[in-house]
């Protein structure tokens, strides 16, 4: 397969997954905002979180003076000037799909093109009355595209690069969503163990479609350590970090090739740490510190995959982690 074709397929999948996970981040923030909180600056603190996670806080503040719910929702969901917005992700996914129209089948193209046309028709009124309805629509369109892809596409290298992009992006975003709750959304240590804390952890599980899985596995009250274990170490949880790295490592082994030895080594190292990891060691290190380190390693793995297999781009879109690191520097 041509590296440029692989590049477009890889990023088509990443942009679709990124749109879905951006919707999940906004969804958990919106649901948390429904809780009563009279503390000073609560709304600003809460709604700055998705801006920070998406790596677009600087762009937002250049256009808006205040951090407010409706403005943040609009900027992250629909603003075409924001390269990390759901709108921009769907546009980029469609452009990548159009560039390799011959490498994907008709059902895949129709699914991604229909999503793009529909979001353009919905823009004038989208999300004002029912933000959650829009987030659910984004997730459903992503599920549809993924189902069509797995159900109709030939199991060749094209599918492998789509899977690689999907699971690399999913690992990145699951870690971010978990870090939002643990490090940002809980403003006071006095809330730990309280009703607000319980509701937020429940909202987190629902935002990654893991609430029922948690009840089935643990049959217990929701606790931060068990939520972290489910979303980090459980290989049977589809959106966990362990499950995602299982897929990434397996896919890289299938693709193989001498140039990808370093990418496979990095993936294997990350996978081994998750496979043999213990939640007690993670919490002792500090969950935020662990997740930050994981995100850095995933970003380096993505760069190595790009160097080893994909075409070089002059207009390479940096990941949210790269944006955050550039802001710190």
Image (tube, helix red, strand yellow):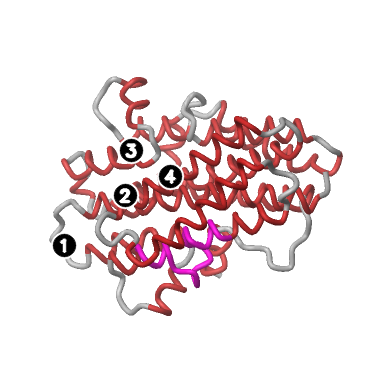
**Is the residue marked by circle 2 packed among few (<14), some (14-19), or many (20+) residues within 10 Å?**
few
Q: CA distance from mark 1 to mark 4?
A: 32 Å
Furthest residue toward right:
258
Check disc 4 and report the residue beneath it.
139
Q: Nearer the viewer, residue 63 or 226?
A: 63
Q: CA distance from mark 1 to mark 3?
A: 26 Å
Q: CA distance from mark 3 to mark 2?
A: 15 Å
Q: Which mark is residue 133?
A: 2
- Confirm or deny contact between disc 1 and disc 4 (CB under 8 A): no
Check disc 1 and report the residue beneath it.
39
**Mark 1 or mark 4, earlier in chain:** 1
Q: Is residue 289 magenta?
A: no
Magenta residues span 73-91
User: Mark 3 or mark 4: which is in front?
Assistant: 4
Quarter of the N terminus within the rendering: top right
Badge 2 element: helix
**Is the residue marked by circle 4 packed among few (<14), some (14-19), or many (20+) residues within 10 Å?**
some
Quarter of the C terminus within the rendering: bottom right
Q: Nearer the viewer, residue 182 or 69?
A: 69
- In the image, 197: left or right of 84? left
Q: Residue at x 39, y 60 (%)?
A: 122
- Confirm or deny contact between disc 2 and disc 1 (CB under 8 A): no
**Mark 2 or mark 4, earlier in chain:** 2
Residue 133 pos. (x, y %): 31, 49
Residue 108 pos. (x, y %): 61, 43
**Is the residue marked by circle 1 packed among few (<14), some (14-19), or many (20+) residues within 10 Å?**
few
Majority secondary structure of magenta residues: helix
Check disc 3 and report the residue beneath it.
206
Quarter of the rendering containing residue 213: top left
Badge 4 element: helix
User: Mark 1 or mark 4: which is in front?
Assistant: 4
- In the image, 69: left or right of 253? left
């Amino acid at each position: 397969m041509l590296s440029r074709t692989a590049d477009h397929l890889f990023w088509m999948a990443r942009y679709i997954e990124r749109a879905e996970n951006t919707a999940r981040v906004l969804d958990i923030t919106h649901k948390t905002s429904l809780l009563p909180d009279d503390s000073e600056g609560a709304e600003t603190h809460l709604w700055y979180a998705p801006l920070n996670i998406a790596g677009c806080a600087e762009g937002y503040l250049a256009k808006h003076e205040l951090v407010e719910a409706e403005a943040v929702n609009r900027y992250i969901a629909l603003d075409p000037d924001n390269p990390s917005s759901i709108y921009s992700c769907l546009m980029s996914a469609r452009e990548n799909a159009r560039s390799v129209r011959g490498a994907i089948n008709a059902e895949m193209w129709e699914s991604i093109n229909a999503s793009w046309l529909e979001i353009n028709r919905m823009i004038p009124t989208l999300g004002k009355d029912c933000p959650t309805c829009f987030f659910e629509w984004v997730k459903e369109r992503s599920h549809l595209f993924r189902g069509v892809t797995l159900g109709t596409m030939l199991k060749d290298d094209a599918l492998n690069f789509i899977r690689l992009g999907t699971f690399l992006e999913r690992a990145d975003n699951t870690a971010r969503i978990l870090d939002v709750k643990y490090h940002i959304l809980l403003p006071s240590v006095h809330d730990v163990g309280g009703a607000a804390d319980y509701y937020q952890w429940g909202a987190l599980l629902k935002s990654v479609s893991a609430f029922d899985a948690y009840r089935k596995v643990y049959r217990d009250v929701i606790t931060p350590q068990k939520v972290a274990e489910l979303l980090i170490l459980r290989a049977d949880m589809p959106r966990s970090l362990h499950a995602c790295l299982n897929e990434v490592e397996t896919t890289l082994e299938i693709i193989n090739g001498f140039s990808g030895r370093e990418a496979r080594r990095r993936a294997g190292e990350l996978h081994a740490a998750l496979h043999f990891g213990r939640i007690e060691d993670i919490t002792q290190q500090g969950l935020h510190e662990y997740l930050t380190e994981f995100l850095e390693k995933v970003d380096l793995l993505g760069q190595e995959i790009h160097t080893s297999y994909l075409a070089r781009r002059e207009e390479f879109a940096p990941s949210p982690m790269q944006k955050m690191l550039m802001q710190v520097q």
